[in-house]
């Protein structure tokens, strides 16, 4: 296990469903301090712990492909080693694959990776390597990785069409807005990064949307731990709301041999505390929309944030005397994407929500341990890995502890049935 921090992020399929894992090793802090432009650091092929797969739990994530990379395309370090046992084959991409720069992607290297059970991806920095690949200059490459902005600005439609027609897996990174995601999806990209999901556009002068008022009313009831009859009244007026709640609850085992089929049954089996946590997530389901069923990446990102922040403060920080409770951490993580959902400033949202003071300060001002953890998670989502690594190191969180927290959160989130 390396002493470098690893970050796990989802890669989306063209329909916006979670479909693969983007595992990024941040540069060592020492090398970053020596120079503004440190030399490339090698990806250690011995990185994966023996229980890497088991740590994801029973969710879908344990069967997804893993893009194991560094921040920039780098050489791999040492002889290739087999991936952890228990990682099944048959995924659209080789289960574990490592991007190589064009000058590294020789036949000997790709053959060694293939023999070790690792796939080779070509990391393109310009159109020349795309054309060279089409011309047959690279052997043994199983996938391709490219910056999505570069693909739109510098790669010809003809070259992209070639990969689409050949069925060649193509991964787009740095997808920073929805327009770019749609552009890539329409051109046959297999997997795309999800930086755009958490970026919100707010308009305080926009007319009030009745749907937003319903959501805020439900949120207010949830955070006030309202009586069951008040919650039931909301559900009676919105039957799709109850349907989505039951789908969400039944997607993860609740210790019952039969499916949960009513709000009262959910309350009896889960208790108010656990039901409240499910209701917080339910806000992100498009229960007031008549749109066709489709994956809901915003709900999953909110769930991942909540689980991550809870794990971080409970497993890595709370033992050092942090006062925030795990429930508050989960609430901050889940509610942190409300501006993206409602297209409203966080300050306007909090006016209508009677949240605990520490939760409100963490969301609005980034204050306290809650605000610190949320900022760290947001930095990692947006690819600011140096910033996130520095925060983890300063807090004394060990790299292996951080990896395990992410695996557990990723595995739990992957189980959620949250398609609308």
Image (cartoon, rainbow, N blue to C red):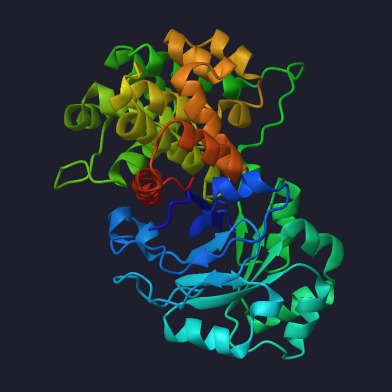
Q: Please name the residue shown 56% across and 65% down the image.
A: 42
Where is residue 232? Give x, y as percent. Answer: 33, 20
Asked whether, in this view, residue 128 is left or right of residue 166, the answer is right
Q: Is residue 58 left or right of residue 175?
A: left
Q: Is residue 11 visible?
A: yes
Q: Nearer the viewer, residue 92 or 140?
A: 140
Quarter placement of the N terminus: bottom left
Give the quadrant of residue 52: bottom left
Which residue shows up at 56% across the image and 49% down it?
292
Q: Is residue 383 visible?
A: no
Q: Is residue 251 above or below residue 312?
A: below
Q: Nearer the viewer, residue 209 or 98?
A: 98
Residue 370 pos. (x, y %):
45, 22
Is residue 185 left or right of 341 when viewed as pictured? right
- Total tally of numbered discs in the picture: 0
- Using the image, determine if residue 101 lies above or below residue 149: below
Outermost residue, left side: 257
Residue 404, image x, y percentages: 34, 48
Which residue is depicted at the point 56% across and 84% down?
109
Depicted 83 relative to depicted 286: above or below: below
């Amino acid at each position: 296990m390396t002493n470098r921090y690893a970050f796990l992020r989802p890669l989306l399929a063209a329909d916006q469903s979670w479909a693969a894992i983007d595992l990024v090793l941040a540069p060592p802090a020492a090398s970053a301090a020596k120079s503004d432009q440190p030399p490339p650091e090698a990806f250690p092929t011995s990185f994966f712990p023996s229980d890497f797969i088991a740590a994801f739990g029973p969710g879908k994530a344990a069967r997804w492909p893993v893009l194991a990379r560094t921040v920039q395309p780098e050489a791999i370090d040492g002889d290739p080693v087999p991936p952890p046992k228990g990682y099944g084959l048959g995924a659209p991409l080789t289960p574990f694959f490592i991007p190589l720069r064009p000058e590294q992607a020789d036949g000997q290297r790709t053959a060694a990776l293939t023999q070790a059970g690792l796939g080779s991806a070509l990391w393109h920095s310009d159109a020349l390597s795309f054309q060279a690949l089409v011309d047959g200059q690279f052997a043994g490459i199983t996938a391709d990785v490219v910056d999505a902005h570069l693909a739109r600005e510098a790669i010809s439609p003809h070259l992209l069409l070639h990969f689409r027609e050949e069925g060649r897996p193509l991964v787009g990174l740095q997808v920073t807005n929805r327009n770019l995601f749609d552009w890539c999806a329409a051109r046959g990209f297999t997997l795309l990064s999800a930086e755009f999901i958490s970026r919100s556009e707010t308009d305080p002068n926009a007319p009030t949307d009745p749907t937003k008022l319903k959501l805020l009313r439900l949120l207010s009831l949830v955070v006030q731990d309202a009586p069951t009859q008040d919650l039931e009244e909301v559900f009676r007026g919105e039957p799709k709301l109850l349907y989505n709640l039951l789908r969400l609850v039944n997607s993860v085992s609740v210790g019952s041999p039969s499916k949960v089929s009513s709000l009262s049954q959910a309350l009896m089996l889960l208790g108010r505390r656990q039901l409240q946590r499910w209701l917080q997530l339910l806000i992100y389901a498009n229960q007031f929309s008549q749109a066709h069923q489709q994956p809901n990446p915003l709900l999953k990102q909110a769930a991942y944030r909540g689980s991550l922040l809870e794990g971080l403060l409970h497993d890595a920080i709370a033992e050092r005397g942090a006062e925030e409770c795990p429930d508050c951490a989960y609430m901050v993580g889940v509610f942190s994407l409300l501006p993206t959902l409602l297209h409203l400033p966080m300050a306007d949202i909090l006016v209508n929500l009677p949240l605990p003071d520490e939760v409100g300060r963490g969301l609005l001002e980034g204050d306290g341990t809650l605000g610190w953890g949320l900022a760290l998670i947001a930095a990692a989502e947006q690819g600011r890995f140096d910033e996130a690594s520095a925060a983890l190191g300063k807090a004394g969180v060990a790299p292996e502890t951080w990896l395990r927290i992410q695996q557990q959160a990723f595995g739990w989130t992957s189980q959620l049935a949250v398609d609308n």
